[in-house]
Image (cartoon, rainbow, N blue to C red):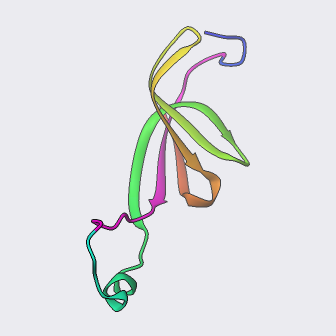
Amino acid sequence: MSARMKKAWRMEVKWRDSKLDNGGWQKVKEHLRDRKAIPCYSVGFVLADDKQGVVLASSVYADRASGVVHIPAGMVVSRKRLK
């Protein structure tokens, strides 16, 4: 582990994701009907948790990580540290 990551710990993050259109032509009112954010949950080893957001990795080895997701701070609903 790098000096920055003294011990890897896991976190569950509930966050909101945006919705992606299927790309076809639709009436504007159909696009505006369902504008809710999609609730998501991610669990992983915390690489960063600061004012910019949360960065989680599915696997961590020494100073390397894989399966990394970056969640912007504005999209985070809640955090839960896992044992």
Q: Is residue 17 magenta?
A: yes
Question: In the image, residue 38 lies at what x, y percent?
Answer: 38, 65
Residue at image location 62% in from the left, 60% down from the top: 74
Question: In the image, residue 77 lies at what x, y percent?
Answer: 54, 60
In the displayed orientation, state which residue is furthest to the bottom: 29
Q: Which image quadrant for residue 46?
A: top right
Q: Is residue 15 above or below residue 62?
A: below
Residue at image location 43% in from the left, 69% down from the top: 37
Quadrant for the N terminus, please.
Answer: top right
Q: Is residue 30 above or below residue 79?
A: below
Viewer-closest of 80 and 27: 27
In the displayed orientation, state which residue is furthest to the front: 25
Query: What is the magenta range?
Result: 6-23
Viewer-closest of 44 and 29: 29
Question: In the image, residue 71 lies at what x, y percent?
Answer: 55, 47
Q: How many marks?
A: 0
Q: Is residue 71 above or below residue 22?
A: above
Residue at image location 59% in from the left, 11% down from the top: 63
Question: In the image, residue 55 lies at what x, y percent?
Answer: 57, 37
Q: Is residue 5 above or below residue 81?
A: above
Residue at image location 56% in from the left, 21% down from the top: 8
Q: Is residue 52 left or right of residue 44?
A: right
Q: Is residue 63 magenta?
A: no
